[in-house]
Each structure stands twice: as structure tokens, then as C-alpha cells.
């Protein structure tokens, strides 16, 4: 009887110790999870998805900061089928935005990213190929550009080869003319085929206050337009000496 009682006490004690160990393990695990959460919170941001880390819009101009390239007319794309190389083809985007796929007919490509176009091609061939696997490569494309017009030294179309601010774009286009209105430089940006945003920037104030990091970066297709100042409208009726006598150039 005494042996049985001693055995029951030993079992109860062992169960109590096991329960404590389980509680301690759960507590440690909870603590680790809390620390992990704190570490993530301390950075102020969670892990970003690839391609979206810098996708926030500019506070002055909408849109993505580093948008993916979108197919446009006259681009040349190459399709490579992993299991069906006989369907490999090189296509030119037509003026209507379509490409004509071999045995699968037309597919609209204009405005799509390469990944979106790959999915569209895969879907188009679903009825012809079993689980088609296709890769898309951009062979020829229109180089990014911006247009500068109005009162700049050399109005025209320029390639956008690197990050370029609106001030840098004006310098590339020959700088301001003496008739330029520095305080009301216009930036036109296409939102879509039917909508264009217009923004006014006081570059004179930015340059005077040395806020060179504030002007926005250009995006492909942007139009920078520098209007005439108010003096230039009456300058043709005044002689240069008379004009300089009464008007200070620092006013404009």
C-alpha cells in the first residue's frame, strides 16, 4: 500500500515537472515571436514585395517612382516556348497595339508589362498547347525621352538616359532664354491616353533657395514647357537701353 502511494506521488511530481517545462517552452516561444515582431516594427516597415519597394508616388506628381516598362507601338518582342520551340517567334507591335501570334491570332500588347504580356500569350495558346510555358524578351523598343519647349535654348526631343530633374532637363535643352519666366515652368505628364496632368514649378525660387533636391524627376514622355515672362510681351516695343533702365532682371 505504501509502495503504491509512493508510485502515485512520483507520477504526479513528474507530470507537474513536465507541465512546467511545457509552459516554459510556450513562454519562450511567445517571447521570441514578440521579439521578432518588435524587430520588424522597429524598422518602421515590413518586407516589401519585389518591384514595389519604391513604388510610392511622388508627393508632387502621381504615379510609381520606378515603373516597369510597358510595351508600346513598334516595339519588337521575342517569344520562346520551353517545350514547343516550333512556336518561337519574333513580333512587332502594330500601330493598333496588337501582335499577331502564330496559330493563335491577334493579342493586344500595347500598355502591358512584359509579365502581363507573357500571361496574355500563355492564355492565348492554352487551347493549342498543353500547359504552355513561354518567355518574353524585349528586342527593340523606343528609348525613353522627354520634350522641352518654349523659352529654352534648344527646344526639342531628348533621350532620357538617367534620372533627370526638371532643372537638369532645361539645362540639357540649352537653358533658359532671357525671355523665360523661371517662376512658372510647366510640366505636362500623361496619366493615360486620355488624361494629362499639368503642374507649375517655381524654379527661380528653388534655385535661389538652393533646394535642388526638390524638383521632380522626369518620366518618359514628359513635356517641359517654359513660358515667356510678362516683360518679353512688351519688349518688342521698347529699346534695350530704355528697358534695362527701368526694369531689373532680378524681378523675373
Image (cartoon, grey):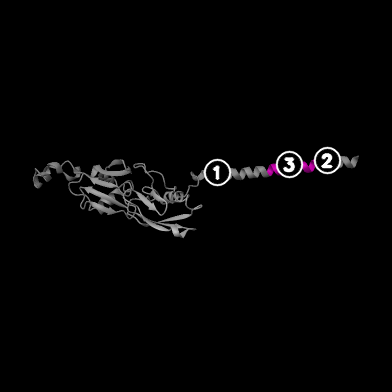
In the displayed structure image, the side of residue 164 where residue 3 appears, left or right: right
* Towards the viewer: 94 or 54: 94
Name the residue carrying label 3: 19
Give the number of the mark in front: 3 or 1.
Answer: 3
Find the magenta span and give its range.
12-24
Q: Find numbered disc 1 in the image and state the secondary structure of the residue it sits on.
A: helix
Residue 251: where, in percent of width, then height?
19, 42
Residue 227: where, in percent of width, then height?
21, 44
Count of number-bearing discs: 3
The residues bearing labels 2 and 3 have C-alpha atoms spaced at a distance of 15 Å
Furthest toward the right, the residue is 1
The quarter of the image holding the C terminus is top left
Mark identifier at residue 38: 1
Earlier residue among tags 2 and 3? 2
Question: Which quadrant would residue 136 be assigned to in this image?
Answer: bottom left
Earlier residue among tags 1 and 2? 2
How crowded is the residue under tag 1: few (<14 C-alpha within 10 Å), some, or many (20+)? few
Q: Find numbered disc 2 in the image and state the secondary structure of the residue it sits on.
A: helix
Relative height, residue 103 to residue 44 (above, below) = below
In the displayed structure image, the side of residue 120 where residue 245 appears, left or right: left
The residues bearing labels 3 and 1 have C-alpha atoms spaced at a distance of 28 Å
The residues bearing labels 1 and 2 have C-alpha atoms spaced at a distance of 43 Å
Q: Are marks 2 and 3 in contact (CB under 8 Å)?
A: no
Q: Is residue 14 magenta?
A: yes
Mark identifier at residue 9: 2
Amino acid at each position: 500500500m505504501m509502495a503504491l502511494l509512493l508510485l502515485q506521488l512520483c507520477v504526479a511530481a513528474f507530470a507537474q515537472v513536465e507541465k512546467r517545462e511545457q509552459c516554459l517552452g510556450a513562454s519562450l516561444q511567445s517571447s521570441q515571436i514578440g521579439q521578432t515582431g518588435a524587430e520588424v516594427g522597429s524598422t518602421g516597415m515590413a518586407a516589401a514585395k519585389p518591384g514595389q519597394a519604391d513604388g510610392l508616388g511622388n508627393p508632387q506628381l502621381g504615379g510609381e517612382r520606378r515603373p516597369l516598362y510597358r510595351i508600346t507601338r513598334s516595339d519588337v518582342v521575342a517569344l520562346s516556348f520551353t517545350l514547343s520551340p516550333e512556336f518561337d517567334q519574333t513580333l512587332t507591335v502594330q500601330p493598333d497595339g496588337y501582335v499577331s501570334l502564330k496559330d493563335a491570332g491577334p493579342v493586344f500588347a500595347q500598355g502591358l508589362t512584359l509579365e502581363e504580356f507573357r500571361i496574355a500569350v500563355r492564355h492565348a495558346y492554352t487551347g493549342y498547347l498543353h500547359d504552355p510555358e513561354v518567355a518574353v524578351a524585349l528586342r527593340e523598343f523606343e528609348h525613353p525621352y522627354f520634350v522641352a519647349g518654349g523659352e529654352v535654348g534648344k527646344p526639342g526631343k531628348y533621350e532620357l538616359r538617367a534620372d533627370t530633374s526638371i532643372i537638369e532637363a532645361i539645362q540639357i535643352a540649352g537653358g533658359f532664354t532671357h525671355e523665360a519666366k523661371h517662376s512658372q515652368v510647366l510640366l505636362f505628364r500623361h496619366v493615360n491616353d486620355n488624361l494629362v496632368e499639368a503642374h507649375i514649378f517655381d524654379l527661380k525660387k528653388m534655385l535661389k533657395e538652393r533646394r535642388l533636391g526638390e524638383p521632380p524627376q522626369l518620366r518618359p514622355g514628359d513635356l517641359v514647357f517654359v513660358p515667356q515672362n510678362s516683360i518679353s510681351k512688351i519688349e518688342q516695343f521698347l529699346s534695350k537701353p530704355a528697358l534695362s533702365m527701368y526694369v531689373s532682371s532680378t524681378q523675373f
